[in-house]
């Protein structure tokens, strides 16, 4: 480790919320690689106390948080006494308070408090947890207005778009560094200069199949992603293309670009992570091997670049880059997400909640893979769209949609 980096007086304090997951553990690898530039000051997770303890011993954070109180005893007994332990739901906000940059690597709607808490505290949110932005969009957008608040996306496609948008600096300034106003004039530069956001999709493990080939899909098949190794929820979302659908809504919310200008392009090799087409027809793309440590490093270092590459492209080995169109008739979750995004207000929160319930039911072998979309479609169909004015409204809609989706799961399985 270089002397210079070791003694860096500008060490940036990172709180890793969801530290035991796929993104969380990769974030800790990036922190190790930063040679002292970043310090993990808070590690928070749901229930994996053994791994949390191991991480705490290695990274020596100021605090460790565990949401599941029943798993806290193990840490109470084993955690070094100089590290503060916070147990229960309050661990999430305690983690947010400890860091300057908050890496939200929680999976699912549970990440909402972290997203809103970080922005209202005027801190940088390195955002992997797309579900909080999608479900709580109107509230999250308002929280972006707090002085000092900023979102730098970790999701690889959005990180790519964030980079591509810099090809037109005032676009980035208008759409990302300032809060996106739902009806404000400051999204106009983006809308005028950007003609399309092209979100790439690997297509998942079932690309090319038709509906009749998908009736007997097993959990194991759905959990095998062709290019990325990720947590179970997002891996299932990738197999249904709901992940891409959520990413379309995420892109709309992050960059203030209308749905008519957001397209999904199937690109099996996952080398191009997304593209922006400008009004003059120029397309800017970001290419790299699929490795989440690049977007994580980008989000922590922005506006600087991380000095550490994770695999440089070898163009002599890249025989070809292929592109295709998504099959919306087979993968209807993508179409449902566009629909919910366009309706806006509480519809994306309902879509997200129904999807979380359906994916869990599939992971628990209660419903089939094709029934995931059935649960989401019926929940959305029966949902009464309302305005989301505050966090309580978001929590209410999420709870209501979950209850409805659970009932639909019961109906299907009885
Ligand atoms: P994961 O299942 O591997 O890890 C989830 C983490 O969240 C764990 O540390 C877990 O303890 C924590 N967690 C779960 N429920 C919690 C709760 N109620 N309260 C507090 N913590 C809780 O998930 P992952 O694949 O790392 O995904 C995390 C987020 O990043 C998701 O929103 C996902 O969509 C997004 N993302 C992941 C990848 C990837 O490569 N894994 C890529 C892009 C975006
Ligand atoms: Mg992604």
Image: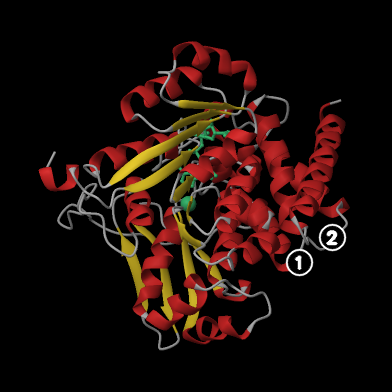
Please indicate whether residue 235 sits to the left or right of residue 369 in the image.
left
150 and 131: which one is in front? 150
Looking at the rendered structure, the secondary structure element under dot 2 is loop
Front residue of 196 and 331: 196
State how the image is colored: secondary structure
Q: Describe the element under mark 1 as helix, strand or loop.
A: helix
Residue 71 % position (x, y): 58, 17
Q: Nearer the viewer, residue 108 or 144?
A: 144
Label 2 beta carbon within 8 A of ligand 1: no
Up/down of 159 relative to 21, above or below? below
Q: State the image coordinates of residue 272 (x, y, percent, origin top left).
A: 35, 60
Q: Tell me: 2 left or right of 121.
A: left
**Residue to which mark 2 is pinned:** 385
| Quadrant position of the N terminus in the picture | top left
Badge 1 local density, few (<14 within 10 Å), some, or many (20+)? few
Q: Is residue 71 visible?
A: yes
Q: Residue at x 52, y 39 (%)?
A: 95
Q: From the image, which quarter does the C terminus lie in?
A: top right
The relative height of residue 8 versus residue 177 in the rendered view (above or below) is above
Say which residue appears at 48% left-offset and 81% top-offset. Answer: 194
Q: Position of residue 17 (x, y in %)?
A: 50, 39
The 10 Å Cα crowd at callout 2, few under 14, some 14 to 19, many 20 or more, is some
Callout 1 touching callout 2 (CB < 8 Å): yes
- Position of residue 245 in the picture relative to residue 310 (left or right): right
Place of residue 280 in the rendered image (x, y in percent of width and height, measured from the top left): 40, 89
Mark toward the start of the polypeptide (1 vs 2): 1
Q: Label 1: which residue?
A: 343
Q: Quadrant of residue 200?
A: bottom left
Residue 330 visible somewhere in the drawing: no
């Amino acid at each position: 480790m270089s002397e210079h980096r070791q003694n860096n007086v500008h060490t940036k304090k990172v709180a890793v919320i969801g530290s035991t997951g796929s993104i969380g553990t990769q974030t800790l690898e990036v922190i190790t690689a930063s040679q002292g530039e970043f310090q993990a000051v808070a590690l928070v997770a749901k229930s994996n106390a053994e791994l949390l303890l191991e991480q705490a011993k290695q990274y020596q954070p100021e605090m460790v948080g565990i949401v599941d109180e029943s798993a806290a005893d193990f840490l109470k007994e084993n955690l070094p006494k100089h590290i503060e332990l916070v147990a229960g739901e309050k661990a999430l906000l305690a983690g947010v308070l400890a860091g300057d940059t908050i890496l939200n690597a929680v999976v699912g709607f549970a990440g909402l408090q972290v997203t809103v808490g970080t922005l209202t505290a005027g801190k940088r949110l390195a955002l992997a947890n797309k579900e909080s932005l999608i479900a709580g969009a109107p509230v999250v957008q308002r929280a972006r207005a707090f002085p000092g608040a900023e979102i730098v996306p970790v999701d690889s496609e959005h990180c790519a778009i964030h980079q591509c948008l810099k090809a037109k600096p005032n676009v980035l300034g208008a759409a990302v560094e300032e809060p996106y106003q739902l009806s404000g004039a400051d999204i106009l530069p983006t809308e005028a200069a950007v003609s399309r956001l092209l979100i790439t999709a690997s297509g998942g493990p079932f690309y090319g199949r038709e509906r009749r080939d998908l009736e007997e899909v097993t959990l194991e098949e759905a959990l095998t992603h062709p290019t990325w190794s990720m947590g179970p929820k997002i891996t299932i979302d990738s197999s249904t293309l709901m992940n891409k659908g959520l990413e379309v809504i995420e892109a709309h919310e992050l960059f203030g670009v209308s749905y008519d200008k957001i397209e999904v392009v199937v690109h099996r090799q996952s080398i191009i992570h997304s593209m922006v087409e400008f009004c003059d027809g120029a397309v800017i793309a970001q290419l790299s091997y699929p490795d989440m440590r690049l977007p994580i490093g980008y989000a922590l270092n922005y506006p600087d670049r991380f000095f550490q590459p994770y695999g440089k492209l070898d163009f002599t080995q890249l025989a070809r880059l292929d592109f295709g169109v998504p099959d919306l008739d087979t993968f209807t979750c993508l179409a449902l997400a566009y629909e919910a995004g366009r309706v806006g207000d509480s519809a994306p929160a309902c879509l997200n909640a129904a999807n979380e319930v359906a994916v869990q039911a599939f992971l628990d072998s209660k419903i089939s893979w094709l029934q995931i979309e059935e649960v989401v479609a019926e929940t959305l169909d029966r949902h009464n769209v309302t305005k989301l004015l505050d966090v309580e409204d978001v929590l209410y809609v999420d709870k209501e949609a979950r209850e409805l989706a659970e009932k639909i799961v019961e109906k299907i399985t009885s």
